Amino acid sequence: MIRIGVLGCGNIGHIIANRRENCEIVALFDQVYSKALGLASVCGGNAYQDFDSFITADFDYVVEAASVRAVRQYAENVLAHDKHLILLSVGALADPIFRNDLLSVARAAERRIFIPSGAIVGLDNLKVGQISQFRKLLLRTTKSPQSLGIGAQKRTLIFKGKSHECIKEFPKNVNVSVALSLAAGREVDVELYADPDVERNIHEIEAEGEFGDLYIRVSNLPSPDNPATSYLAALSILTLLKNLDQPLVVGT
């Protein structure tokens, strides 16, 4: 049984607590202590009011379901305390200096950082970009104006550029662009649309290379109580946890 600590006790944390398999939630921390207490009552773990007490509890993996800001604040400390890190807010790794520093800490501590597939599919085979360059790699994301925190009366292109630029403007919405960039070993071109007529979060991936070409379209239902997050993102964390210690590994 895998022992985990949950960093961030909002919507994703509640999904993990209610649907987890193959893991025990030992510790919970949120900057809003009442959220940690509420989630502790669901899963039976211990809520901690300060991070130092949380990170010294007896568990092996921290599941981060908080924010890019929280990753920048706590991630190095997680690894330095001999915990593996499962990272949902992967947008924090768009900063190459922070990413390299974090990887250095992970190597020194002999710990690993896991990035779930999140709200998209196809990350495994997009890793071929690390050994065979893509001619094209594009992520086209469409979300409701409400989930993006803007007003739009019709389908509107609100961002076009590279993934590291997009995550700066929309840190809660396009973590998938950074995950794609890390998997493929190159920056992803991003188009972000606000569309009042959509009820789901839609991600389209187009890639071309010496292997051929591919097109992937994922139409995600928003996560309960948080329209900015796709439900598939929470399910991908649960799937990762379920299979962490399995002897058979499927996928590249």
Image (tube, rainbow, N blue to C red):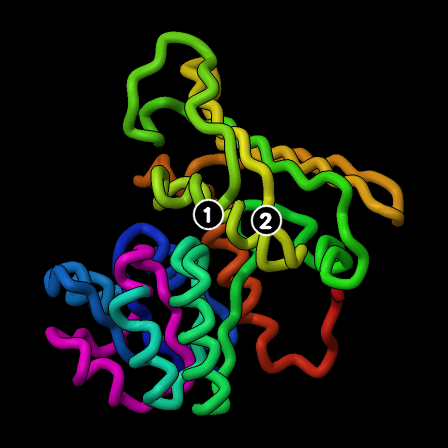
In the visual, does 187 lie left or right of 146?
A: right
| Cα gap from disc 1 to disc 2, whole angstroms | 8 Å
Q: Which residue is mark 1?
A: 164
Quadrant in which the C terminus appears: bottom right
In the visual, does 135 lie left or right of 53?
A: right
The quadrant in which residue 179 appears is bottom right
| Location of residue 42 with respect to 46 vertically, above or below | above
Q: Position of residue 6 (x, y in %)?
A: 32, 70
The quadrant in which residue 18 appears is bottom left
The quadrant in which residue 55 appears is bottom left
Q: Which residue is mark 2?
A: 187
What element does badge 2 sit on? loop
| Location of residue 30 with respect to 215 vertically, above or below | below
| Location of residue 102 with respect to 11 vertically, above or below | below
* Residue at the farthest top position: 153
| Location of residue 176 with respect to 35 vertically, above or below | above
For the residues bearing labels 1 and 2, Cβ distance under 8 angstroms: yes
In the visual, does 85 lie left or right of 50?
A: right
